[in-house]
Image (cartoon, rainbow, N blue to C red):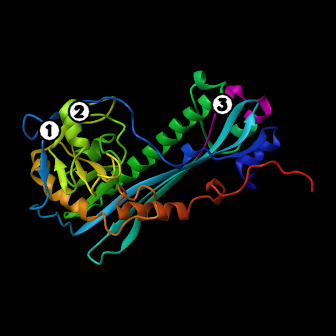
Amino acid sequence: MTVPGSWVEAVVAAGAVPASHIPEASLGRGDVDEFIGADPVEGGELRVEPLSDARPLAPAAVCFLDGIEQWRVVGYGGITPIVRAHAAAAIRRRGPERRLRTVAEATAEVAITRLDRLPAGVRRALEGAGVRVLEFPAEEAGQPARALAAVRVEVQRTRTALERRLGEAWLRALAAEEWLVVDGVLSDSAALSEHPRALGVVKSHGAQYFEGAELERALTLADGHRTGVFRPKARGARRDIYSWYVRLWPWEGNDLLYGLLRLEARAHPETIALASPIAAWIRAERAPVATPDRRWDRLLYPIHDVETYLRARAPRDLTPLPASRLPRTAS
């Protein structure tokens, strides 16, 4: 599908071979798959705490921040993919009346390719089309599978930057008793990771913080319990943060990661004092259930609501349709 009047139409007219492929990887982001390490800050080793006696935190208002990413291969210059990517982020606020309303949003559209690998005419058309062009690393060009993996990294960076800018800007408007709940890590942002009422909610668990008995303790956490607070060891540009796990639903009979969330908040003694009230609050956010999303066991309904809002406003040509990709033949 070529979008009429768009930069896609311009590069196809200049000689790019049209394509229409939406990789599964375009539907979301993952977590890093590596051992990070962490230091417990509640006691000498990672422990488990029940939430049965914890009084849930009850903020007067909560703002929920999330984003989406969608991308599609729209053409090829030789064997080099040309990708159209859309990223969007929004903050929806829930006040005393319990209704979610959009208070901030932002979008970005980019083209992703390797300009030096495109035919001259296609390159000129793309450079003159008025769209922001990102390039994946030169060493990933050549084999399309590697190129698309590199494209995914660029799309995720675009989405992350959009969410970070929106969240940091909204902190200045946050009222005294209001919290900002971010879908994902806080530690990519100095402002978010240092704010006393910002909370990161992490659904994916590729990063490993413990080994041996402590890892087993974290991953077999019972329903209605949290782990002790720990400090993940810094990697890259990520900031100092406190973190802990909470289980939303019983995992037995399902999977170790079923209903498991990791929370992030500022590295401060007050975070330790609030760890159980925050965990009890977040556990209460599991209702209503965020079905039919397949991640419902770890997806808070207000975050699901933000995603639903953004996807309803996303470009239709970037939404996968249940259509056949079989070649058309004459009848």
Residue appearing at x 46%, y 44% in the figure: 29
Of 63 and 242, which appears nearest the observer? 242
As displayed, is residue 208 above or below residue 311? above
Tell me the SS state at disc 2: loop
Q: Are marks 2 and 3 in contact (CB under 8 Å)?
A: no
Residue appearing at x 22%, y 45% in the figure: 194
Separation of marks 1 and 2 at Cα, in angstroms: 9 Å
Q: Which residues are magenta?
A: 110-123
Label 1, on which residue? Answer: 46
Which amino acid type is marked by label 3? Pro
Separation of marks 2 and 3 at Cα, in angstroms: 36 Å
Mark number displayed over residue 196: none
Work out whether mark 1 precedes mark 2 in sequence or the reverse, and give the earlier one. 1
Label 2, on which residue? Answer: 210
Q: Position of residue 120 (x, y in %)?
A: 78, 29
Which amino acid type is marked by label 2? Phe
Residue appearing at x 20%, y 56% in the figure: 279
Of 329 and 305, which appears nearest the observer? 329
Work out whether mark 1 precedes mark 3 in sequence or the reverse, and give the earlier one. 1
Which amino acid type is marked by label 1? Leu
Q: Are marks 1 and 2 in contact (CB under 8 Å)?
A: yes
Mark number displayed over residue 144: 3
Q: Position of residue 44 (x, y in %)?
A: 7, 34
